[in-house]
Image (spheres, helix red, strand yellow):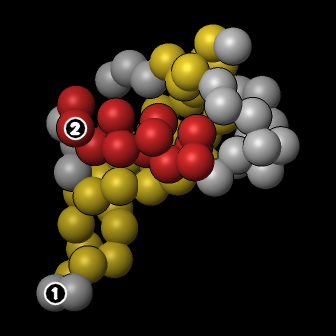
Amino acid sequence: MKVTTTTAYVDLDGDYGSVEGVEVTCDRCGRSEESFGTGDASLKRCAFLLRENCPRNEKNYYQVSE
């Protein structure tokens, strides 16, 4: 199933201070995942983590965009 998401650009705590990152939230259940960086690879990583960590054990396809 295709599931839409909401993307927010956030500051995350890194080893040496604040780092730019993204937070992607599932519009269906509200679970969110974070990743360092703001590029396409970071968005894809969040989508992968949402799929792997789904609280409903669903294997959804998450549509992420900037």
Q: Does 43 appear above or below 5?
A: below
Residue name at image x 22 percent, y 66 percent = 19
**Going by the image, does 42 lie left or right of 27?**
left
- Label 2 sits on a secondary structure element that is helix
The single residue placed furthest to the top in the displayed view is 2
Looking at the figure, which quarter contains the C terminus?
A: top left
Q: Amino acid type of disc 2?
A: Ala
Residue name at image x 34 percent, y 36 percent = 43
| Alpha carbon separation for disc pair 1 and 2 | 22 Å
**Going by the image, does 31 lie left or right of 62?**
right
Q: Earlier in the sequence, mark 1 or mark 2?
A: 1
Q: Position of residue 64 (x, y in %)?
A: 44, 23
Residue name at image x 26 percent, y 78 percent = 14
Q: Which residue is mark 1?
A: 16
**Going by the image, does 35 lie left or right of 14?**
right
Q: Which residue is mark 2?
A: 41
- Residue toward you, 48 or 25: 48
